[in-house]
Amino acid sequence: MTATPPIPDHDRPLPDAASRTCWESGAQSSADWRALDAAHNLHPFSDHKALATEGSRVITRAEGVWLWDSDGTRVLDGMAGLWCVNVGYGRPELVQTAARQMTELPYYNLFFKTATPPAIELSRKLVELTPPGLNHVFLVNSGSEANDTIIRMVRHFWALEGQPERRVIIARDNGYHGSTLAVASMSGMTAMHKQGGLPLPDFAHIREPHRFKVAPNTPPEAFAHEAAGWLEEAILSIGPGRVAAFIGEPIQGAGGLIVPPPGYWAEIQRICTKYDVLLIADEVICGFGRTGQWFGSDTYRIRPDMMTLAKGLSSGYMPVAAAMVGDRVAATLIDRGGEFLHGFTSSGHPTACAVALENISILEREGLVDRVREDIGPYLMSRLETLRDHPLVGEVRGQGLLAGVELIRDKAHHTFFSPVGRVGARCRDHCFRNNAVVRAVYDTMVMAPPLVIGRDEIDILVDTLSHALDQTHQDLPRLLD
């Protein structure tokens, strides 16, 4: 196994001003960058007015698990970008692969009865890595596009099977599957549904298996059976002849790092089989080693009919994603579907596919998936367990390098903060000010660092969170007024 990349030297000189600025804009300082950003750049999932008032933090370079901002401050990235930079920043192999591919064939599409070697090879490799039976691949650019593709495939499949009324896709509360109109509707986040006239019809949602929140005193196995039963109740309520599929993340990420209790996925699988409902595993966050196996489906022994891949597929170095299609669905689409009227200009982009292939090679060569399972994942959880006695900490949960620390108002009475999210956001801000990126999802502090993170760096991450918890606890009288 290759050693973890060393922590960059604090005294390493920063790039000169010319290499850190955009010559066309003329920006020279952090204030210049923030002003330009506020004037022109609309950020995802942001309150634009509030952000413009506060000013964004401008990240200028990165290496390993570390970021540097435009003021030269070093920041530990506890979120691997956006759950995606699995092999860490600054990997020359990926840069060289992109340059080589762009020199040879920078772009061509998969339309016009054509293909490219990187798209073909990446498809073959994904079939090799994913659970058995997923033998076909539709390449796209993001997890949102991949899930949008799956929606269309699922409904087309059932129409070809003579059951066009099977259109309803069931997901879970606080499940996240993307932000286009269709996948935002499929996602179970009600705040997203308040904008743009969502949700679209034929999407339904069941409660998420959040034992700490809804049934902390119920034994895990009993709660697993109860929570999976919510799917069966929904199928029967909607009508088995109308339900097309169920989709879920093996571990819910953006919904609060919800780890399913033992036996939950086995019961979900049984129910889907019983009612002939297609099972879709959204592996956008869990895939490519984050749970200590190649996929969350391997960790929980899920046998999906379809699977969504993105993020760690290229470690975020290039936009690339995939919808994996099982044999049953693929056979119908291929044999009887005719032309599938769906695709994107950059579907199977050769440079993105080449980078994804090299990214997978790094994961394999350096044994990073095994490292997460056997070493660094358990170490992260052991360090986070030391926070359990903190007065704000209600639960520590996780799997591999996915971890969450849920904050609670009163442990003895199991009461949560209201309004939800205010205390978590304050803790997140304290982490940021102490130069570590930790995400707040509602009142759960979430971590998903690069898979190359070292033990010393985990110590820094957990110590920073511990300090932020202390600062947040001191702030409670003002937060709860």
Image: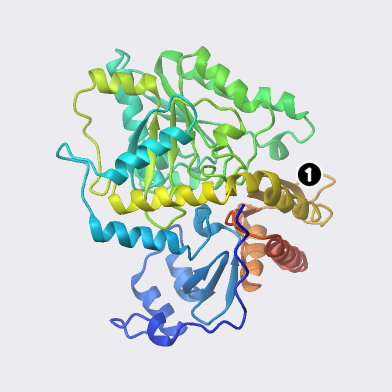
Vertical position of residue 443 compared to residue 374: above or below: below
Q: Position of residue 301 (x, y in %)?
A: 59, 27
Q: Is residue 182 visible?
A: no
Residue marked by disc 1 = 414
Q: Position of residue 58 (x, y in %)?
A: 47, 74
Name the image quarter holding the C terminus: bottom right
Q: Position of residue 326 (x, y in %)?
A: 40, 25
Q: Is residue 144 visible?
A: yes
**Nearer the observer, 326 or 369:** 369
Q: Within 10 Å of the Cα at label 1, are there few (<14), some (14-19), or many (20+) other Cα atoms?
A: few
Q: Position of residue 479 (x, y in %)?
A: 69, 64
**Nearer the observer, 373 or 385:** 373
Residue at (41%, 63%) from the top-left corner?
43
What's the colour scheme?
Answer: rainbow
Residue at (67%, 52%) from the top-left corner?
418
* Number of numbered discs overlaid on the protein picture: 1
Vertical position of residue 262 compared to residue 64: above or below: above
Residue at (40%, 18%) from the top-left corner?
242
Image quarter of residue 278: top left
Vertical position of residue 408 compared to residue 152: above or below: below
**Nearer the observer, 175 or 259:** 259
Outermost left residue:
112
As helix, strand or loop, the secondary structure at mark 1 comes to loop
Vertical position of residue 283 compared to residue 30: above or below: above
Q: Amino acid at mark 1?
A: His
